[in-house]
Amino acid sequence: MLWLCLHLPDLALEIFTRGAPANDPLVVVCGNGRKRRVALCNAAARGRGIRPDMGLNAAHALAGSLRVCERDREAERVALDRLAAWSGQFTSVVSRTPPQALLLEVAGSCRLFGGLERLKEMVSRGVAELGYRASLASAPTPLAASWLAQDGREACVTRQNALAAVLASLPLTCLGLTAKQSETLHGMGVRTIGDCLRLPRDGLARRMGPELIHILDRALGCVPDPRPAFVAPSVFASSLPLPGAVSTAEGLLFPVRRLLLELEGFLRARDAGTRSLSLSFHHAAAGTTPVRLELVAPSRDAAYLTLLLRERLDRVALPAPVEEVSLHVADPCPLAPRNLDFFAPAQAAEGMLIERLRARLGRDAVRGLGQVAEHRPERAWTYAEPGSGAAVRGGSGRQLLQGSACTSHGAEDRKRPLWLLREPMPLEVRGERPYLDGMLVLGRERERIESGWWDGQDIARDYFIACSGQGVRLWVYRELAGEHRWFLHGMFA
């Protein structure tokens, strides 16, 4: 086995700063009353001289604009769970090591990702893009990998017989000893794990208890060290608090992108995508602004989803500054492998165009057309989901329906225009010929339609393709009953 440990030393701070770059001094404090002390601080606070374990009053004296956040261990646990779900894209075995570490069993993943170093590089880059600082180390045992990462040594140990030499220089703090145990070992002149390993096992067990020997054996792989596997939730739900209120949609793209990167890893772990996602922008005094994005085809590409949401956010009016952003995906769907034909790139580009137009203009502003088994032209089409059915590009006049007839004279198939007028437009008649900015020249072929008697909307028409004096091809018809009027019904491209 080979374990990769991700140690997150600043997790307690990063849950407050991942949403946006924090330029003002910020500290995370713990304790009560006068005992409140700085647990972690950002770079701006360190620049003012603030350090961990400093009293809060002293920190305020160094930075008047200091932002103070109470340590939130529950939020840290949730963030670790979300990072564990994201890590599932690299291995099927992820184990949490609270409060600030993850273990990934990667022996079976190295070849898939191009080797251990390449895998570590991908994990490290992905964690940084999510807004975390992590120390990574690998070893044949989970405990050894944890100790190395905790000490900040990004070692890469692959052989079990090399563990003792690599772990020898680590300090005793890795062992998690009690204060009394640490004092006893220091009194014996023991400063490192290597010093412990050189002591007689029986004597060390009598002085310090058998548990210390068991811990060392687990680290060296002498005894089993099973770790519980993390089970990711079936739906994705994540949120990011912002260090400061954001009042523009453009400023929300930074936290939204980080949530989408988190979503991408979550979906990759399941070989899944999503057809829709829901964003919520939380305001301090004005409730929540929901934003929903629907896709033509399932996707999990964070860069592409960010592009779509950029278009979508341009149309969002924020009633108040945003203090937190949430992302929810309730229905991940499988991305089944499929064979792509020669035209697949064009089809993919068409789907991307539809999604970008919908993101910018709204869902109802971009629709497809589908055919209906109906001879009457104004009823022979319907709105449809883009790509779900055949588009109306032309039709044949040779269909027969119950009680209706459509016949062609002079041609096997009749072409119909894609552009129909909302209502047929009456035409002027001169010398028994239709007139529109000049006399229209009628084609010799005609299409006769007689249909609709059963619903009271019956028609009887002869359709012609006509050409105007400007060379525009028009679709006109003459009534077969009544006054035999002429109408313009459509135009060809």
Image (cartoon, rainbow, N blue to C red):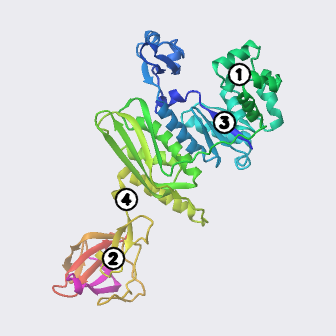
Residue 74 horizontal side relative to residue 159, left or right? left
From the viewer's perspective, is the residue at label 3 or at label 4 nearer?
3
From the viewer's perspective, is the residue at label 3 or at label 2 nearer?
3
Which label sits on residue 172? 1
Q: Element under label 4?
A: loop
Residue 201 horizontal side relative to residue 326, left or right? right
Q: Element under label 2?
A: loop
Count of numbered circles in the view: 4
From the viewer's perspective, is the residue at label 1 or at label 4 nearer?
1
Residue situated in front as seen by the camera: 468 or 231: 231
- What residue is disc 3 on? 5
- What residue is disc 2 on? 380
Of marks 2 and 4, which one's residue comes earlier in the chain?
A: 4
| Residue 451 seen by the camera | yes
User: Identity of the amino acid at label 2?
Assistant: Ala
Q: Identify the residue shown where x is 47% and y is 23%.
A: 23
Of marks 3 and 2, which one's residue comes earlier in the chain?
A: 3
The magenta segment: 439-468
